[in-house]
Structures are given as structure tokens and as C-alpha cells.
């Protein structure tokens, strides 16, 4: 039996829709998340990320396939998996008529933690997530970002062995997002494991050890963000603002995209010198930068959409 | 990255685990709605005024009915709260995807709402004892029967809450159910005023069954042994069945189909 924090094999989920053909949300997802890892699940809207997270967090029945949390079969015995997990639900909100301090404390007590532990973890989470200024104000008076921080703080304070975070930093300002990232890194350093979904690819890159890209219910790529970048033909991006007319000369270096007068080439670092020499010979201005995860994501998912 | 498993000891949940803590959470949440506590008595007060104007001699019966109706309408608050938390806040996922048990979530919510709204119900109860000159045993019977009505209504409210996907639909249907079954049958007035052919139905509906039993104790209604048994055992059986089903349903509906 697998004792990985999360393991799934050929997981499928089909939704029956009245008067319509069934919708296949997951079409055989296999995944393995190791202890202490932070793994990001990426994909377009409706790709199946939240469905997977809801099944893994015992909130939705799979149609077929296997999924285990710390070796416990989530399909057959969800109640055995639940003590190991904590979830930030997509678009979840704290109780509006509780202040963050009471929200966190009462949630920890409801999970069975002692008064002392709940108290100390509440204060730690408030401090860590920068909630101190408004920790005693009712959540209804807080901004959307502050409420989301409260939700994340509530779940982080559990220090559960496995955390599922569905778009945890949505609506947060860049400072708050970085506080969340730091808290999540601390948590995994203590032994927790995290599976998160996000549409912020800088977040996925900064935070995750590995990522899975899901498209139409299937994993189309998995690996590190560098693996993903390499899969699009290189890790460097050369932009030639006046290079569109020379597209054929640069095609052999890698993937080329002409947009108006400009040309963008994805290239491996070892061929960069050769490419720059050619650009100089053609008297073209060139800008070199790293391929971002977002660019790699767009290309990988775009390719899959074209294939389908 | 760590490669060893987490060292936090994991305990499996016990049945009804988390009930007390979620009850306290719900008390804190509900306690902020002080206006709702005041308005929870509006319908009862209006009906009591009507009864007092039309037939002051029935005010004792009406006060007993008001206590039972108040316990019954707490089911509507459970329905509203459970649906609101699930549909609007999605906070049920936060609680249920964890060690807290689904039955603890349901009972904690129902218990928390009961505690917060207990003060106005207790006030009505005290008035009923004084005005209708209830003996100690009848007062205890009122307490027990109101408790059964509350448990029935809270269970029905929680079960119903799981069928809604939109809060707007709840506004339309929830008050309809609880007001129709709490006001139309003989809860605020004696069973004898109800059409004879429909009395067995009234004796099978928890609020009016409890009311009929109490009216019988204070001499406002005469029940045969068969009618008494129908009302009492019907109320106990219905409450037990609905409560057990609510426990089952709470566990069943944690996971979507």
C-alpha cells in the first residue's frame, strides 16, 4: 500500500447533466505527491483542477480509478483520510460575523486541537499572515483580500499533514501573496505536504517543487517548471523587434513566433551565441530573457488544444 | 524538501466529534445577530395578540403553542444557516474536509442556534407556566415536547438545506413550510377547533401533536387513549426517524455525487 501523502491512478470523474451528454471532468489522472512537497496543479478554467482537488479532499466521489491519502482509500473510506487533510475551498469565505482571531481559534478547536495548542497556533498564524491589525474586527468589515488571508491563515494554522489549497491567494495584494508563500514554505519545512491550484504562474514557479498541467481532464505535462520550459524548445527567449521578415533565417534555432514586425525565438542556451551572431550580421536589435512559466504554459496548452 | 513522513500524531475521529466546538462557533456567529433574536418572536407575538383580543380565555393554550412554534421555527433557522454556509461561504468544505464529523457539524449548528434563541423561548415558557398555571409535571412535559419538536424541525431543516443550490429559492420555500405546519394546524388554538376528520393528521404533525398533548394535560382538549398514543408515539417515532436520517444524510452529503 502506498504511504505517499497523495497518490492517484487513472482517476476519472464524469458528471451527469440533465438532458445533456455526460461531461467528463477527469479522464484518467494519475499523480503522486511526495512528503514535504509543494505541488501546483495548473490548467485553464474547467480543465479539471478543482474536480481533482475536491475528490482528493473527500468532497466528491470519483467515477472510477484509485486515490489514496497517506495510504487511505479516499473513495472507500473518506473518514479515515479526513484527519490528515485541511482545505482552502475555491471562493471560500470565513464566517462574516466572527473576527479572524475567533475564526481561526474555533476552527482549530472543531478539528479537535486542545485549547492551548489552538490558542498558540492562532496567535502564530495571525502574526505570520499579517492579520494582527484587524484580527479582532468582524470579517464582514474586512476587504476581500483580508478575508482570503483569514481563510488561508485558518487552514495553515492546522499544520495538517496534507493541505489542499484551491486558488489560495486570489484577490490578495503582492505583499500578502508573498506572506502566504513564506508560510507555505515554513509549513512544508515542518513536514506538511501541499497541493495547490493557481492561475498565477509566477506563484506556481516561486512556490512549487513540481507542477502538473491538466487539460480537458488529463495530465498533459508534469515535472519542474524548468522541465516545462525545456519542453517548449528552450529556456531562453530572444525578441527581435524588427525581425519578422527574417523568420526563415531563424527557424532552425527553435520555435519562432512572428507578431507584426517582431519575431520571438525560443532557444536553448547553448545556441544563443550562434543566434546572436546571426542577428548582428542582419543588423537586428535583440533582447534576451528567460522563458517564463506563463509562456511555456501557453505554448504547451495551446499545442494540446491545436492537437484536439 | 523533507522525505520523511510528518510526525504529527493523527487520531481518527470519534462519532459526533467536533459537536461542542462547532456549537460554540455557531453561538458566536449567531450572537452577533441580535436583531434576528428580537424578530424571531414577531409571528408568535402577533398571534398571541390576536388570540388575546378574540378569546382571552385561550391565551394559555396560545402561549404553550407559541413555545412549540418557536421551537419548530428554529428548524427554519438551521435550514437557512446550513444552506447559507454551504452556498454562499462554501465554509462547509472547510469544516467537513477535516477531522470534524458531519454529524458534529449538523448537531453543533442546530445546538448553537438553539442556545442563542433559547432566551426568548424561555420567556414565553415562563409566561405559559404563569398564565396557564402549569404544574411542575406539565411544565416538564412542555420542556420535553418542545425539545422533541426542536429536534424534529432542526433535522428536517438540515436535510432540506442540502437540496437547495440557490439562496433565493430558500426564501420562497423555507418560511412556507415552517409557517404552514406551525400555524395552520391546532398549535395556537385547541384541537377541538380543528375539523374532526383532519384531527388524526394534526396528531401526526409534530408541533400540533405536542400542542394537543399539552392541551389535554391542562384540560383544554379531550384526547382518547388512542389519540394520546398516536400523538405521543407518533411524535417520538417521527423525531427519532428524522433525526437518524439527518445523521445519515449529513454523512452521505459530505461528498457530492
Image (spheres, rainbow, N blue to C red):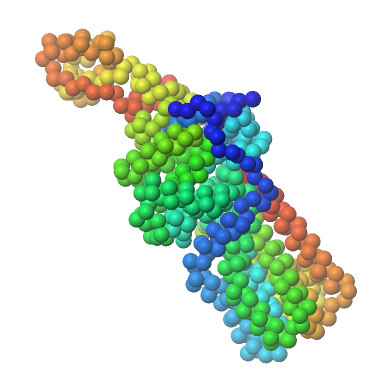
Between A191 and B119, the residue placed more toward the observer is A191
The answer to whether residue A264 is left or right of residue A45 is left
> Who's the residue at 47% across and 48% down the image?
A121
Identify whether B210 is placed above or below A282: below
Quadrant of residue A177 in the image? top left
Residue A136 x/y as whole percent: 41, 59
Residue B170 drawn at (x, y percent)? 56, 60
Which quadrant holds residue A293?
A: top left
- Residue at the spot x=61%, y=66% of the render? B114
**Residue B66 appears anywhere in the view:** no
* Residue B107 at least partly seen: yes
Residue furthest toward the left? A283
Q: Quadrant of the C terminus of chain A?
A: top left
Residue in the image at 16% along x and 20% along y: A286
Seen from the viewer's position, the closer of residues A275 and A109 is: A109
**Which of the 4 image quarters holds residue B9?**
top right
Q: How far from the left and from the top, in percent, is residue B142?
A: 73, 75
Asked if residue B138 lies left or right of residue B51, the reply is right
In the image, taking residue B151 as reference, residue A12 lies left or right, namely: left
Indicate whether B251 appears above or below A36. Answer: below
x and y, in percent, of residue B252 in the image: 66, 46
Amino acid at each position: 500500500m502506498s504511504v505517499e501523502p497523495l497518490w492517484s491512478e487513472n482517476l476519472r470523474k464524469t458528471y451527469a447533466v440533465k438532458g445533456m451528454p455526460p461531461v467528463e471532468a477527469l479522464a484518467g489522472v494519475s499523480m503522486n505527491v511526495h512528503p514535504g512537497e509543494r505541488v501546483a496543479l495548473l490548467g485553464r478554467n474547467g480543465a479539471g483542477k478543482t474536480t481533482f482537488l475536491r475528490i482528493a479532499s473527500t468532497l466528491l466521489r470519483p467515477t472510477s480509478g484509485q486515490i489514496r491519502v497517506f495510504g487511505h482509500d479516499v473513495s472507500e473510506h473518506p473518514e479515515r483520510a479526513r484527519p490528515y487533510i485541511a482545505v482552502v475551498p475555491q471562493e471560500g469565505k470565513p464566517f462574516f460575523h466572527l473576527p479572524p482571531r475567533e475564526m481561526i481559534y474555533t476552527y482549530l478547536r472543531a478539528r479537535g486541537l486542545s485549547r492551548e495548542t489552538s490558542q498558540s497556533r492562532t496567535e502564530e498564524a495571525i502574526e505570520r499572515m499579517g492579520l494582527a491589525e484587524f484580527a479582532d474586527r468582524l470579517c464582514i468589515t474586512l476587504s476581500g483580500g483580508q478575508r482570503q488571508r483569514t481563510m488561508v491563515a485558518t487552514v495553515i494554522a492546522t499544520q495538517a499533514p496534507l493541505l489542499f489549497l484551491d486558488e489560495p491567494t486570489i484577490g490578495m495584494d503582492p505583499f500578502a501573496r508573498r506572506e502566504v508563500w513564506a508560510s507555505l514554505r515554513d509549513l512544508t519545512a515542518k513536514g506538511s505536504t501541499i497541493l495547490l491550484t493557481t492561475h498565477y504562474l509566477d506563484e506556481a514557479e516561486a512556490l512549487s517543487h513540481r507542477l502538473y498541467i491538466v487539460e480537458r481532464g488529463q495530465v498533459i505535462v508534469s515535472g519542474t517548471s524548468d522541465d516545462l520550459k525545456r519542453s517548449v524548445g528552450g529556456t531562453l527567449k530572444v525578441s527581435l523587434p524588427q525581425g519578422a521578415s527574417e523568420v526563415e533565417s531563424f527557424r532552425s534555432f527553435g520555435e519562432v513566433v512572428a507578431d507584426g514586425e517582431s519575431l520571438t525565438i525560443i532557444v536553448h542556451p547553448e545556441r544563443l551565441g550562434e543566434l546572436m551572431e546571426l542577428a548582428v550580421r542582419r543588423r537586428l536589435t535583440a533582447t534576451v530573457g528567460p522563458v517564463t512559466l506563463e509562456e511555456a504554459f501557453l505554448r504547451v496548452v495551446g499545442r494540446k488544444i491545436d492537437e484536439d | 524538501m523533507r522525505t520523511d513522513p510528518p510526525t504529527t500524531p493523527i487520531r481518527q475521529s470519534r462519532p459526533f466529534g467536533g459537536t461542542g466546538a462547532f456549537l460554540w462557533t455557531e453561538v458566536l456567529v449567531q450572537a452577533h445577530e441580535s436583531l434576528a433574536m428580537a424578530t424571531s418572536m414577531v409571528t408568535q407575538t402577533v398571534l398571541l395578540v390576536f388570540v388575546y383580543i378574540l378569546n382571552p380565555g385561550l391565551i394559555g393554550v396560545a402561549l404553550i403553542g407559541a413555545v412549540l412554534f418557536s421551537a419548530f421555527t428554529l428548524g427554519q433557522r438551521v435550514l437557512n444557516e446550513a444552506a447559507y454556509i454551504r452556498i454562499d461561504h462554501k465554509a462547509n468544505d472547510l469544516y467537513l474536509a477535516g477531522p470534524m464529523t458531519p454529524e458534529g457539524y449538523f448537531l453543533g449548528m442546530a445546538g448553537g442556534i438553539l442556545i442563542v434563541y433559547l432566551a426568548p423561548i424561555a420567556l414565553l415558557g415562563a409566561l405559559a407556566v404563569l398564565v396557564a398555571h402549569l404544574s411542575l409535571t406539565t411544565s416538564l412535559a412542555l420542556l420535553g415536547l418542545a425539545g422533541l419538536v426542536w429536534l424534529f424541525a432542526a433535522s428536517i431543516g438540515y436535510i432540506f438545506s442540502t437540496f437547495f443550490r440557490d439562496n433565493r429559492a430558500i426564501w420562497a420555500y423555507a418560511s412556507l413550510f415552517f409557517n404552514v405546519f406551525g400555524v395552520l394546524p391546532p398549535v395556537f388554538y385547541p384541537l377541538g377547533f380543528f375539523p374532526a376528520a383532519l384531527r388524526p393528521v394534526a396528531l401526526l404533525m409534530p408541533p400540533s401533536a405536542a400542542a394537543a398533548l399539552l392541551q389535554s394535560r391542562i384540560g383544554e382538549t379531550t384526547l382518547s387513549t388512542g389519540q394520546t398514543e398516536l400523538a405521543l408515539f407518533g411524535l417520538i417515532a417521527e423525531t427519532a426517524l428524522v433525526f437518524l436520517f439527518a445523521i445519515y444524510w449529513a454523512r452521505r452529503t459530505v461528498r457530492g455525487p
